Amino acid sequence: MSAGLYLAQRVTAAVLGLAVLVHLATVMIAVKGGLTAGEILGRTAGNVGFLLFYAIFVVAAAVHAPIGLRSVLREWTLWRGRSLDLAMLAFSAVILTLGLRAAYAVFSA
């Protein structure tokens, strides 16, 4: 793994670690507080802070996951080279697209 990929993996791991903690704490507080899904959507609709938080979360996941999967595939299979790199770029694009669409859908609900 190149130094750039290694650094990207570690930086996004830190971002994801914090984001997961914030997300889980928020969900637990909302559920414990008795909020319904509709009430949660009512609070997130139009909330730019929510959108930015989850956009950062999604971007971190879209960078982190393909780097890790690429390493696993290189270790466990014979798949190497440009085709693997392009497949991981495509995988990253799918995560990014679907994640940002989901965050925006909740924002605009």
Image (cartoon, helix red, strand yellow):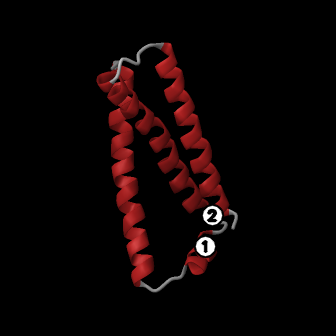
Give the image location of residue 38, x and y in percent: 61, 79
Q: Is residue 58 above or below residue 20?
A: above
- Asked if 23 appears above or below 94 in the picture, the reply is below
Query: SS of the residue at dot 2?
Result: helix
The residue indicated by pointer 2 is 106
Q: Is residue 43 left or right of residue 74?
A: right
Picture residue at 65% right of the left edge, 69% below the top: 45
Badge 2: residue crowd in 10 Å (few <14, some 14–19, many ≥20): some
**Residue at horizontal 64%, vertical 51%?**
101
Q: Secondary structure at mark 1?
A: helix
Indicate the amino acid at tag 1: Leu
- Image marks 1 and 2: residues in contact by CB distance under 8 Å: yes
Q: Amino acid at mark 2?
A: Val
Check the image and name the residue furthest to the bottom. Answer: 34
Res 21 → quadrant: bottom left
Q: Quadrant of the N terminus?
A: top left
Residue at left offset 30%, top offset 26%: 76
Query: Is 37 or 80 nearer to us in this picture?
Result: 80
Write down the residue under mark 1.
41
Residue 96, by quadrant, is top right
Q: Compared with residue 5, is residue 64 higher up or lower down, i.e. above or below?
A: below
